[in-house]
Amino acid sequence: MTELRPDPAAADPFVSVIVPVYNHRKALALCLEALEAQTYPRDRHEIIVVDNASEDALAPVLREYPRVRVVTEATPGSYPARNRGLAVARGEVIAFTDADCVPSPDWIASGVHALRRSPDSGVIAGRIRLTFRAPARPTAIDLYSSLTSKRQHVNVERGFSETANLFTWRAVVDRVGGFDPELRARGDTIWGRRVGAAGYAIVYAEDVCVSHPAPALATFVRRVRRMVGGRYDIRRRSGIARFDTATDGATDPGQIRRVMARTGHLGRRDRVRVLGVTFLVEALIRLEWLRLRAGGQSLR
């Protein structure tokens, strides 16, 4: 499918970096500071922030970065916001990250290089490095998150990349289309599999790195509920919205074995803490599934 892309040997393709944001004012400032410090030529990339009807006042932060293009998207959800960014993007290369991520200084340069060195790639899935507030004393949520989330190499094996760290050619987007605006979660999974179905490779790149903070408890709970909503919405479309313990739960024996198999480097106490979070996740999943079955709306 390389005929759809610009010449990979051309110097310094123009890059559009798209950052959807809903609130996250303090995190956005850190993200934009990192994007301002990129080693990639300033005249060969743009930064597009898509304000998804934030309740926080983002203007004071955005005024500090006059080079940033700001557009708004009133439809709730990160996928409508990303589509809005795509609609105004001018780049041959499209890069996505999230407002609570901090890209490394060579992030754009490494992402472009990764696209060039993988001639059959439709997507570059970069590393998402989890950071802890207290690295010497990680919480149970920190430990569980490090074992189960932001594992881009695993995502690639499953045929997609998280949009927290994703590079692609604009021509690939033009061929496969944008994100499903009706989904509140798992839209990157669906989009990535469309890219794969179109014949493009999804390639993991360790050196294309962003940092992402492990969530606090409240954020973690909301994220679990949001991911359940994404799965539920996809199932409902197919006419099957029943809970499947083997694929939807967190405490199916197979799921527990997979999580605990990654804890060999942890002490006994921390292994027990991880197991406890696993059962918390199971409870959250089942409660959210029941809420959605009763007519509730999936969370944004």
Image (spheres, rainbow, N blue to C red):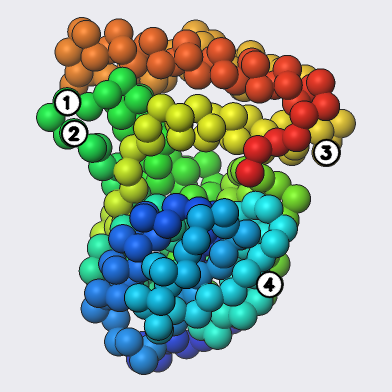
Q: Earlier in the sequence, mark 2 or mark 3?
A: 2
Label of residue 114 in the image: none
Q: CA distance from mark 2 to mark 1?
A: 5 Å
The image quarter containing residue 43 is bottom left
Tell me the mark number nearer the camera, choosing from 4 and 3.
3
Q: Quadrant of the N terminus?
A: bottom right
The image quarter containing residue 236 is top right
Label of residue 137 in the image: 1
Q: Point out residue 29 in the picture as x, y percentages from the top left corner.
A: 35, 63
Q: Are marks 2 and 1 in contact (CB under 8 Å)?
A: yes
Kindly give the residue lying farthest to the left in the view shown. Answer: 136
Label of residue 134 in the image: 2
Indicate whether 6 appears above or below 186: below
Q: In the rendered image, is residue 170 in sight?
A: no
Disc 1 marks which amino acid? Arg
Q: In the rendered image, is residue 149 in sight?
A: yes
Disc 4 marks which amino acid? Arg
Disc 2 marks which amino acid? Ala
Q: CA distance from mark 3 to mark 1?
A: 43 Å
Callout 1 secondary element:
loop
Q: CA distance from mark 2 to mark 3?
A: 42 Å
Indicate whether 146 appears above or below 32: above
Q: Point out residue 202 in the picture as x, y percentages from the top left corner.
A: 49, 57
Question: Disc 3 designates what residue?
Answer: 237
Q: CA distance from mark 4 to mark 3?
A: 24 Å
Tell me the mark number nearer the camera, choosing from 4 and 2.
2
Question: Disc 4 designates what residue?
Answer: 175
Disc 3 marks which amino acid? Arg
Q: Earlier in the sequence, mark 4 or mark 2?
A: 2
Q: Earlier in the sequence, mark 4 or mark 1?
A: 1
